[in-house]
């Protein structure tokens, strides 16, 4: 992308245009991505009521999550505004029951109108200038009784890892968010559990489940040096990802938010 072109959309969101290769390599090409996928593989069936229903995957990126649902018999609609991410996803998911829509979360009401009984939105809200408004839009697309699998980048974990790395001045000033410029992958709107709780309530959603994704890995002084240690780390992450107090410092927070079937 030429330097003179803003990396932000007109709405102020950080679309991942031009970042597909970097994202594929730096996240999914390494242990952080492998661990995230291993944890999701365990947690999604525990945290969601999966009945082969259609899934809307918002900000689906390279398509890993859509692929996970498609392989389990769900027809998926992947919505993504960054053209190169969408092209990668199309290639990766060729032959699977996935439809691709070049659109933003804000365009959902016109482009993929609900109601949907299952919506997934993983690692997207933290890249938006108005994550609270985005939550209301997602809630508006859910059917009564519908589930939203929401994953967000955890601001409290970002503070912790900055302190662990010695970035004390930055942590003390609470200057944690990224600028969204250049090729950096520090989100512009890292979020807290309190914000999600409050915004869910504002949007008429109930927090049914919560887990931390990577509650230990990102604070390690030394990465696991052997296959056996890697397996021990995965076992620890799986064991403590829903336990107090550990889930609260997961790098990401994974929620199941539900729109009640009836309002009283
Ligand atoms: C960190 S990636 C997450 C991708 C995928 N959901 C995952 O978990 O691997 C964030 C994605 O959100 C997309 N995005 C940014 N702004 C968006 C918006 N307003 N509506 C929908 N997606 C958006 C980006 O283009 C990028 O593909």
Image: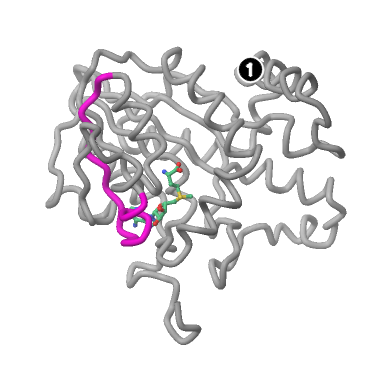
- For label 1, the residue is 238
In this rendering, position of residue 39 left or right of residue 119: right
* 230 w.r.t. 198: above or below: above
Task: Assign the N terminus to one quadrant of the image.
Answer: bottom left
Ligand 1 has an atom within 8 Å of the beta carbon of the residue at disc 1: no
Colour mapping used in the image: one colour
Residue lying farthest bottom? 4
- x, y percentage for residue 170? 77, 61
The crowding category of the residue bearing disc 1, from other C-alpha atoms within 10 Å (few below 14, some 14 to 19, many at least 20), is many
Residue at x 38% of width, y 28% of height: 68
* 212 w.r.t. 174: above or below: above
Residue at x 58% of width, y 38% of height: 33
In this rendering, position of residue 218 left or right of residue 22: right
Determine the image quadrant of residue 75.
top left
Residue at x 72% of width, y 19% of height: 231
Residue 245: in magenta span:
no
What is the magenta range?
A: 73-88
Residue 81: in magenta span:
yes
Determine the image quadrant of residue 204.
top left
- x, y percentage for residue 66? 33, 35
In this rendering, position of residue 53 left or right of residue 258: left
- Of residues 158 and 72, the one nearer the viewer is 72
- x, y percentage for residue 18? 44, 67
In this rendering, position of residue 100 left or right of residue 171: left
Q: Label 1: state its secondary structure.
A: helix
């Amino acid at each position: 992308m030429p330097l003179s072109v803003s990396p932000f959309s007109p709405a102020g969101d950080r679309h991942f245009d031009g970042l597909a290769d970097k994202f594929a390599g730096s996240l999914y090409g390494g242990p952080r991505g492998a661990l995230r996928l291993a944890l999701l593989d365990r947690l999604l069936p525990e945290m969601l009521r999966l009945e082969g229903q259609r899934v809307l995957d918002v900000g689906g990126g390279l398509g890993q999550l859509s692929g996970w649902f498609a392989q389990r018999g769900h027809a998926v609609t992947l919505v993504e505004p960054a053209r190169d991410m969408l092209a990668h996803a199309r290639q990766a998911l060729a032959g699977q029951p996935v439809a691709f829509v070049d659109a933003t979360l804000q365009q959902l009401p016109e482009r993929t109108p609900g109601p949907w009984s299952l919506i997934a939105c993983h690692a997207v809200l933290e890249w938006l200038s108005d994550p609270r408004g985005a939550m209301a839009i997602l809630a508006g697309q859910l059917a009564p009784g519908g589930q939203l699998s929401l994953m967000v980048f955890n601001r409290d974990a970002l503070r912790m890892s900055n302190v662990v790395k010695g970035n004390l001045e930055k942590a003390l000033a609470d200057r944690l968010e990224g600028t969204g410029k250049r090729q950096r992958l520090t989100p512009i709107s890292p979020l807290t559990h309190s914000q999600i709780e409050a915004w869910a309530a504002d949007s008429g959603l109930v927090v049914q489940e919560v887990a931390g994704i990577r509650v230990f890995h990102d604070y390690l002084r030394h990465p696991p040096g052997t296959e056996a240690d890697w397996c021990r780390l995965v076992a620890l992450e799986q064991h403590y990802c829903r336990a107090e107090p550990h889930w609260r410092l997961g790098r990401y927070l994974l929620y199941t938010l539900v729109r009640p079937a009836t309002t009283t």
